[in-house]
Amino acid sequence: MRRQFYSKNIKFLKFFDQNNIGSLPRIFLSSLLVIFFFYSMPIILSFVNENNLAIENNSKKVLAYTLNSKNNNIEGNDKILNEKDLLVDIFSLNEIETDSVRLNASTIRQLFADTNYKLDDVRKKKLVKPVALTLLPNEIKKIENVKKRKEFFIQIVLPLILKENNNIKLDRKRLFSIINKSNNTDLEKKWIEKKYKQYGVPSKDLTTLKIRMDEIPVSLAIAQAAKETGWGTSRFAQEGNALFGQWTWSGEGLKPKDAEKSEGHKVMKFNVLQASVRAYQRNLNTHSSYKDFRQERARLRDQGKALDSIILSEFLNEYAETGNEYVEVLKKIIRQNNLQDFDDAKLLPSSIELESLI
Protein backbone atom coordinates (compact mmCIF):
# COMPACT_ATOMS: atom_id res chain seq x y z
CA MET A 1 0.00 0.00 0.00
CA ARG A 2 2.86 2.35 0.89
CA ARG A 3 4.56 1.66 -2.46
CA GLN A 4 1.32 2.28 -4.29
CA PHE A 5 0.89 5.59 -2.46
CA TYR A 6 4.38 6.80 -3.44
CA SER A 7 3.75 5.77 -7.04
CA LYS A 8 0.60 7.87 -7.15
CA ASN A 9 2.52 10.84 -5.69
CA ILE A 10 5.17 10.58 -8.39
CA LYS A 11 2.52 10.53 -11.11
CA PHE A 12 0.86 13.51 -9.46
CA LEU A 13 4.11 15.53 -9.42
CA LYS A 14 4.89 14.59 -13.02
CA PHE A 15 1.55 16.06 -13.97
CA PHE A 16 2.54 19.38 -12.44
CA ASP A 17 5.96 19.25 -14.16
CA GLN A 18 4.34 18.65 -17.49
CA ASN A 19 2.10 21.64 -16.99
CA ASN A 20 5.00 23.89 -15.97
CA ILE A 21 3.63 24.72 -12.55
CA GLY A 22 6.15 26.37 -10.28
CA SER A 23 8.07 24.51 -7.58
CA LEU A 24 6.39 26.30 -4.66
CA PRO A 25 2.83 25.32 -5.68
CA ARG A 26 4.06 21.75 -6.30
CA ILE A 27 5.50 21.50 -2.82
CA PHE A 28 2.40 23.05 -1.30
CA LEU A 29 0.00 20.70 -3.08
CA SER A 30 2.13 17.63 -2.38
CA SER A 31 2.27 18.53 1.30
CA LEU A 32 -1.49 18.89 1.42
CA LEU A 33 -1.87 15.48 -0.19
CA VAL A 34 0.44 13.80 2.32
CA ILE A 35 -1.24 15.54 5.28
CA PHE A 36 -4.70 14.58 4.03
CA PHE A 37 -3.67 10.94 3.59
CA PHE A 38 -2.21 10.47 7.07
CA TYR A 39 -5.01 12.46 8.70
CA SER A 40 -7.86 10.63 6.96
CA MET A 41 -6.60 7.05 7.17
CA PRO A 42 -7.23 6.57 10.94
CA ILE A 43 -10.72 7.98 10.50
CA ILE A 44 -11.45 5.66 7.57
CA LEU A 45 -10.09 2.61 9.41
CA SER A 46 -12.09 3.48 12.50
CA PHE A 47 -15.27 3.82 10.43
CA VAL A 48 -14.67 0.47 8.73
CA ASN A 49 -14.11 -1.29 12.04
CA GLU A 50 -17.16 0.23 13.66
CA ASN A 51 -19.38 -0.56 10.67
CA ASN A 52 -17.92 -3.88 9.69
CA LEU A 53 -21.30 -5.60 9.70
CA ALA A 54 -22.60 -3.14 7.15
CA ILE A 55 -19.99 -4.04 4.55
CA GLU A 56 -19.18 -7.59 5.56
CA ASN A 57 -20.59 -10.30 3.34
CA ASN A 58 -22.67 -12.15 5.93
CA SER A 59 -24.41 -14.57 3.57
CA LYS A 60 -25.48 -17.73 5.41
CA LYS A 61 -24.35 -16.38 8.78
CA VAL A 62 -27.89 -15.17 9.27
CA LEU A 63 -28.98 -18.79 9.03
CA ALA A 64 -26.72 -19.95 11.76
CA TYR A 65 -27.76 -18.03 14.83
CA THR A 66 -29.76 -20.89 16.31
CA LEU A 67 -26.93 -23.30 15.60
CA ASN A 68 -24.28 -20.99 17.00
CA SER A 69 -22.98 -21.28 20.54
CA LYS A 70 -23.33 -17.51 21.01
CA ASN A 71 -26.42 -15.94 22.57
CA ASN A 72 -28.55 -13.59 20.52
CA ASN A 73 -31.08 -10.84 21.18
CA ILE A 74 -34.08 -11.31 18.95
CA GLU A 75 -35.91 -8.36 17.39
CA GLY A 76 -35.22 -5.89 20.15
CA ASN A 77 -36.18 -8.07 23.10
CA ASP A 78 -34.01 -7.38 26.11
CA LYS A 79 -34.14 -10.95 27.32
CA ILE A 80 -31.55 -13.45 26.13
CA LEU A 81 -32.90 -16.54 24.43
CA ASN A 82 -31.77 -20.03 25.22
CA GLU A 83 -31.08 -21.25 21.70
CA LYS A 84 -31.33 -24.89 22.74
CA ASP A 85 -35.03 -24.25 23.37
CA LEU A 86 -35.39 -23.14 19.76
CA LEU A 87 -33.94 -26.38 18.46
CA VAL A 88 -34.85 -28.97 21.08
CA ASP A 89 -37.34 -30.74 18.80
CA ILE A 90 -34.90 -30.62 15.90
CA PHE A 91 -32.09 -32.14 17.94
CA SER A 92 -34.43 -34.85 19.23
CA LEU A 93 -35.51 -35.68 15.68
CA ASN A 94 -31.89 -35.76 14.62
CA GLU A 95 -30.96 -38.16 17.41
CA ILE A 96 -33.84 -40.59 16.86
CA GLU A 97 -33.14 -41.27 13.21
CA THR A 98 -29.57 -42.52 13.37
CA ASP A 99 -29.93 -45.87 11.62
CA SER A 100 -31.26 -44.58 8.33
CA VAL A 101 -30.66 -46.64 5.22
CA ARG A 102 -29.73 -44.87 1.99
CA LEU A 103 -31.89 -46.27 -0.79
CA ASN A 104 -30.57 -46.15 -4.32
CA ALA A 105 -32.37 -44.22 -7.04
CA SER A 106 -33.87 -47.28 -8.74
CA THR A 107 -35.33 -48.54 -5.45
CA ILE A 108 -36.87 -45.13 -4.77
CA ARG A 109 -38.36 -44.98 -8.26
CA GLN A 110 -39.89 -48.38 -7.70
CA LEU A 111 -41.28 -47.21 -4.36
CA PHE A 112 -42.88 -44.22 -6.07
CA ALA A 113 -44.31 -46.50 -8.76
CA ASP A 114 -45.67 -49.00 -6.22
CA THR A 115 -47.44 -46.20 -4.33
CA ASN A 116 -48.57 -44.54 -7.57
CA TYR A 117 -46.83 -41.33 -6.57
CA LYS A 118 -46.61 -39.09 -9.67
CA LEU A 119 -46.16 -35.34 -9.84
CA ASP A 120 -48.63 -35.03 -12.72
CA ASP A 121 -51.30 -36.54 -10.48
CA VAL A 122 -50.31 -34.24 -7.63
CA ARG A 123 -50.72 -31.19 -9.86
CA LYS A 124 -54.23 -32.34 -10.79
CA LYS A 125 -55.57 -33.93 -7.60
CA LYS A 126 -53.49 -31.97 -5.07
CA LEU A 127 -52.84 -35.09 -2.97
CA VAL A 128 -49.38 -36.33 -2.02
CA LYS A 129 -48.51 -39.83 -0.85
CA PRO A 130 -46.77 -39.79 2.58
CA VAL A 131 -43.51 -41.27 1.30
CA ALA A 132 -40.87 -39.93 3.68
CA LEU A 133 -37.28 -40.64 2.71
CA THR A 134 -34.51 -39.99 5.19
CA LEU A 135 -31.55 -39.66 2.80
CA LEU A 136 -30.98 -38.54 -0.76
CA PRO A 137 -29.79 -41.20 -3.21
CA ASN A 138 -26.22 -40.80 -4.41
CA GLU A 139 -27.28 -41.57 -7.96
CA ILE A 140 -29.30 -38.36 -8.29
CA LYS A 141 -26.10 -36.73 -9.51
CA LYS A 142 -25.93 -39.21 -12.37
CA ILE A 143 -29.39 -38.48 -13.77
CA GLU A 144 -28.41 -36.67 -16.95
CA ASN A 145 -31.90 -35.65 -17.98
CA VAL A 146 -32.38 -32.33 -16.16
CA LYS A 147 -36.18 -32.50 -16.17
CA LYS A 148 -36.20 -36.01 -14.69
CA ARG A 149 -33.62 -35.06 -12.05
CA LYS A 150 -35.70 -32.05 -10.99
CA GLU A 151 -38.91 -34.08 -10.79
CA PHE A 152 -37.16 -36.79 -8.79
CA PHE A 153 -35.84 -34.22 -6.33
CA ILE A 154 -39.28 -32.60 -5.96
CA GLN A 155 -40.86 -36.01 -5.31
CA ILE A 156 -38.39 -36.57 -2.47
CA VAL A 157 -38.64 -33.20 -0.70
CA LEU A 158 -42.35 -32.44 -1.25
CA PRO A 159 -43.72 -34.87 1.39
CA LEU A 160 -41.10 -33.67 3.90
CA ILE A 161 -42.06 -30.01 3.45
CA LEU A 162 -45.77 -30.79 3.65
CA LYS A 163 -45.21 -32.83 6.81
CA GLU A 164 -43.52 -29.92 8.58
CA ASN A 165 -46.23 -27.53 7.40
CA ASN A 166 -48.80 -29.95 8.81
CA ASN A 167 -47.04 -29.90 12.16
CA ILE A 168 -47.24 -26.11 12.17
CA LYS A 169 -50.90 -26.20 11.12
CA LEU A 170 -51.76 -28.48 14.03
CA ASP A 171 -49.85 -26.25 16.46
CA ARG A 172 -51.50 -23.14 15.04
CA LYS A 173 -54.94 -24.74 15.32
CA ARG A 174 -54.28 -25.66 18.94
CA LEU A 175 -52.92 -22.19 19.71
CA PHE A 176 -56.05 -20.42 18.45
CA SER A 177 -58.22 -22.89 20.30
CA ILE A 178 -56.41 -22.15 23.57
CA ILE A 179 -56.38 -18.36 23.28
CA ASN A 180 -60.09 -18.30 22.44
CA LYS A 181 -60.92 -19.97 25.76
CA SER A 182 -61.64 -17.95 28.87
CA ASN A 183 -59.82 -20.44 31.09
CA ASN A 184 -56.91 -22.69 30.25
CA THR A 185 -55.79 -25.91 31.87
CA ASP A 186 -52.31 -26.33 33.33
CA LEU A 187 -51.46 -28.59 30.39
CA GLU A 188 -52.46 -25.88 27.91
CA LYS A 189 -50.45 -23.27 29.79
CA LYS A 190 -47.37 -25.51 29.76
CA TRP A 191 -47.84 -26.11 26.03
CA ILE A 192 -47.91 -22.37 25.29
CA GLU A 193 -44.83 -21.84 27.49
CA LYS A 194 -43.05 -24.47 25.43
CA LYS A 195 -44.05 -22.76 22.18
CA TYR A 196 -42.86 -19.37 23.42
CA LYS A 197 -39.43 -20.91 23.86
CA GLN A 198 -39.58 -22.88 20.63
CA TYR A 199 -40.39 -19.77 18.60
CA GLY A 200 -38.04 -17.43 20.44
CA VAL A 201 -40.63 -15.21 22.16
CA PRO A 202 -39.19 -14.49 25.64
CA SER A 203 -41.60 -11.55 26.02
CA LYS A 204 -44.49 -14.06 25.88
CA ASP A 205 -46.33 -11.88 23.42
CA LEU A 206 -49.20 -13.82 21.82
CA THR A 207 -49.30 -11.62 18.71
CA THR A 208 -45.64 -12.36 17.99
CA LEU A 209 -46.19 -16.08 18.56
CA LYS A 210 -49.15 -16.13 16.15
CA ILE A 211 -47.08 -14.38 13.47
CA ARG A 212 -44.14 -16.75 13.88
CA MET A 213 -46.10 -19.97 14.14
CA ASP A 214 -47.05 -20.23 10.48
CA GLU A 215 -46.28 -22.18 7.32
CA ILE A 216 -43.67 -21.62 4.64
CA PRO A 217 -45.14 -21.79 1.11
CA VAL A 218 -44.30 -25.16 -0.40
CA SER A 219 -43.10 -23.69 -3.68
CA LEU A 220 -40.73 -21.34 -1.86
CA ALA A 221 -39.24 -24.15 0.24
CA ILE A 222 -38.74 -26.34 -2.84
CA ALA A 223 -37.11 -23.47 -4.74
CA GLN A 224 -34.70 -22.72 -1.91
CA ALA A 225 -33.80 -26.37 -1.48
CA ALA A 226 -33.21 -26.64 -5.23
CA LYS A 227 -31.03 -23.55 -5.27
CA GLU A 228 -29.02 -24.47 -2.18
CA THR A 229 -28.33 -28.07 -3.24
CA GLY A 230 -28.25 -27.91 -7.03
CA TRP A 231 -31.40 -30.06 -7.10
CA GLY A 232 -29.95 -32.51 -4.59
CA THR A 233 -26.48 -32.91 -6.08
CA SER A 234 -24.32 -30.83 -3.72
CA ARG A 235 -21.78 -32.37 -1.34
CA PHE A 236 -23.57 -30.84 1.64
CA ALA A 237 -26.88 -32.42 0.62
CA GLN A 238 -25.34 -35.80 -0.13
CA GLU A 239 -23.04 -36.07 2.88
CA GLY A 240 -24.92 -34.01 5.44
CA ASN A 241 -28.60 -33.94 4.41
CA ALA A 242 -28.27 -30.14 4.35
CA LEU A 243 -31.07 -28.98 2.07
CA PHE A 244 -30.96 -25.30 3.01
CA GLY A 245 -27.36 -24.50 3.87
CA GLN A 246 -27.58 -23.63 7.56
CA TRP A 247 -24.24 -22.71 9.11
CA THR A 248 -22.89 -23.72 12.51
CA TRP A 249 -19.89 -22.70 14.58
CA SER A 250 -20.40 -25.24 17.33
CA GLY A 251 -22.41 -28.15 15.97
CA GLU A 252 -21.47 -31.05 13.75
CA GLY A 253 -21.02 -30.01 10.16
CA LEU A 254 -19.12 -30.11 6.88
CA LYS A 255 -16.32 -27.66 6.19
CA PRO A 256 -16.63 -25.87 2.83
CA LYS A 257 -13.68 -26.83 0.62
CA ASP A 258 -13.02 -23.24 -0.44
CA ALA A 259 -13.39 -21.77 3.07
CA GLU A 260 -10.54 -19.74 4.54
CA LYS A 261 -8.68 -21.32 7.43
CA SER A 262 -9.68 -18.41 9.63
CA GLU A 263 -13.37 -19.07 9.03
CA GLY A 264 -14.69 -21.30 11.78
CA HIS A 265 -18.09 -22.06 10.34
CA LYS A 266 -19.32 -25.32 8.89
CA VAL A 267 -22.46 -26.29 7.02
CA MET A 268 -24.80 -27.92 9.53
CA LYS A 269 -25.04 -31.68 9.16
CA PHE A 270 -28.27 -33.59 9.84
CA ASN A 271 -28.89 -37.29 10.27
CA VAL A 272 -32.12 -37.09 8.26
CA LEU A 273 -33.63 -34.80 5.66
CA GLN A 274 -36.67 -34.08 7.84
CA ALA A 275 -34.50 -32.39 10.47
CA SER A 276 -33.04 -30.10 7.82
CA VAL A 277 -36.51 -29.02 6.69
CA ARG A 278 -37.61 -28.34 10.26
CA ALA A 279 -34.47 -26.30 11.01
CA TYR A 280 -35.06 -24.25 7.85
CA GLN A 281 -38.65 -23.44 8.78
CA ARG A 282 -37.67 -22.58 12.34
CA ASN A 283 -35.01 -20.25 11.01
CA LEU A 284 -37.42 -18.29 8.78
CA ASN A 285 -39.96 -18.19 11.59
CA THR A 286 -37.63 -16.84 14.29
CA HIS A 287 -34.60 -15.00 12.93
CA SER A 288 -34.68 -11.21 12.99
CA SER A 289 -33.42 -11.06 9.39
CA TYR A 290 -36.79 -12.42 8.26
CA LYS A 291 -39.04 -10.20 10.35
CA ASP A 292 -40.34 -8.45 7.22
CA PHE A 293 -41.00 -11.83 5.62
CA ARG A 294 -43.18 -12.79 8.59
CA GLN A 295 -44.93 -9.43 8.65
CA GLU A 296 -45.85 -9.73 4.98
CA ARG A 297 -47.07 -13.29 5.54
CA ALA A 298 -49.27 -12.05 8.40
CA ARG A 299 -50.59 -9.25 6.18
CA LEU A 300 -51.59 -11.78 3.52
CA ARG A 301 -53.33 -13.82 6.22
CA ASP A 302 -55.22 -10.79 7.50
CA GLN A 303 -56.40 -10.01 3.97
CA GLY A 304 -57.60 -13.58 3.46
CA LYS A 305 -55.11 -14.14 0.65
CA ALA A 306 -53.00 -17.18 -0.16
CA LEU A 307 -49.36 -17.21 0.92
CA ASP A 308 -47.82 -16.21 -2.41
CA SER A 309 -44.24 -17.44 -2.72
CA ILE A 310 -43.38 -14.85 -5.37
CA ILE A 311 -44.44 -12.02 -3.08
CA LEU A 312 -42.81 -13.50 0.02
CA SER A 313 -39.54 -14.26 -1.76
CA GLU A 314 -39.02 -10.48 -2.02
CA PHE A 315 -38.26 -10.49 1.69
CA LEU A 316 -35.49 -13.12 1.54
CA ASN A 317 -32.77 -10.89 0.13
CA GLU A 318 -30.72 -11.45 3.30
CA TYR A 319 -30.79 -15.22 2.91
CA ALA A 320 -27.77 -15.20 0.59
CA GLU A 321 -24.83 -12.93 -0.08
CA THR A 322 -26.14 -12.12 -3.56
CA GLY A 323 -29.14 -10.31 -2.07
CA ASN A 324 -31.73 -9.25 -4.63
CA GLU A 325 -30.09 -11.42 -7.27
CA TYR A 326 -30.83 -14.43 -5.07
CA VAL A 327 -34.49 -13.37 -4.86
CA GLU A 328 -34.73 -13.19 -8.65
CA VAL A 329 -33.22 -16.66 -8.96
CA LEU A 330 -35.86 -18.04 -6.58
CA LYS A 331 -38.65 -16.44 -8.60
CA LYS A 332 -37.23 -17.91 -11.78
CA ILE A 333 -37.05 -21.41 -10.28
CA ILE A 334 -40.63 -21.15 -9.02
CA ARG A 335 -42.02 -19.94 -12.33
CA GLN A 336 -40.00 -22.13 -14.71
CA ASN A 337 -40.86 -25.29 -12.78
CA ASN A 338 -44.49 -24.36 -12.00
CA LEU A 339 -43.81 -24.96 -8.31
CA GLN A 340 -46.86 -23.01 -7.18
CA ASP A 341 -48.91 -25.98 -8.37
CA PHE A 342 -47.84 -27.63 -5.11
CA ASP A 343 -48.78 -24.79 -2.74
CA ASP A 344 -52.27 -26.13 -2.14
CA ALA A 345 -51.28 -29.80 -2.19
CA LYS A 346 -52.23 -31.94 0.81
CA LEU A 347 -50.28 -34.78 2.35
CA LEU A 348 -52.43 -37.87 2.61
CA PRO A 349 -52.95 -38.57 6.33
CA SER A 350 -50.86 -41.07 8.22
CA SER A 351 -52.97 -40.57 11.36
CA ILE A 352 -56.54 -39.67 12.36
CA GLU A 353 -55.35 -36.31 13.70
CA LEU A 354 -54.01 -35.31 10.29
CA GLU A 355 -57.28 -36.09 8.50
CA SER A 356 -58.65 -32.72 9.62
CA LEU A 357 -56.01 -31.00 7.49
CA ILE A 358 -57.19 -32.59 4.22
Image (cartoon, rainbow, N blue to C red):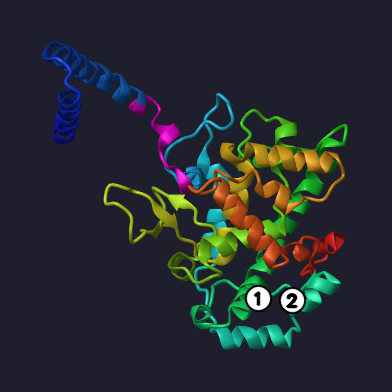
Q: Is residue 112 above or below residue 253?
A: below
- Residue at the front extreme? 20
Q: In this view, does 268 lie above or below 155?
A: above
Is residue 265 or residue 66 the one in the foreground? 265
Secondary structure mainly formed by the magenta segment: helix
Report helix, strand or loop for mark 1: helix
Q: Tell me how far mark 1 sits from mark 2, CA to CA.
A: 7 Å
Q: Place residue 76 in its image quadrant.
A: top right
Q: Check contact, mark 1 vs mark 2: CB within 8 A.
A: yes
Question: Of 159 and 324, which appears nearest the observer?
Answer: 324
Is 50 inside the magenta-drawn segment?
Answer: yes
Q: Is residue 72 visible?
A: yes
User: Which residues, given as a range, are shown in magenta?
Assistant: 48-60
Q: What residue type is labelled 1?
A: Glu
- Give how far across and how far down residue 188 sits, in percent: 76, 41
Q: In which quarter of the image is residue 14?
A: top left
- Secondary structure under badge 2? helix
Residue 37 % position (x, y): 23, 21
Q: Residue at x 36, y 23 (%)?
A: 47
Residue that label 2 marks: 119
237 within the magenta span: no
Tell me the quadrant of the picture where the C terminus can be found. bottom right
Tell me which residue sits at (75%, 49%) in the image.
171
| Residue annotated with mark 1 | 151
Q: Where is residue 63 in the image (x, y as percent from the top left)?
A: 51, 47
The residue sitting at the left extreme is: 23
Q: Is residue 282 left or right of residue 209?
A: left
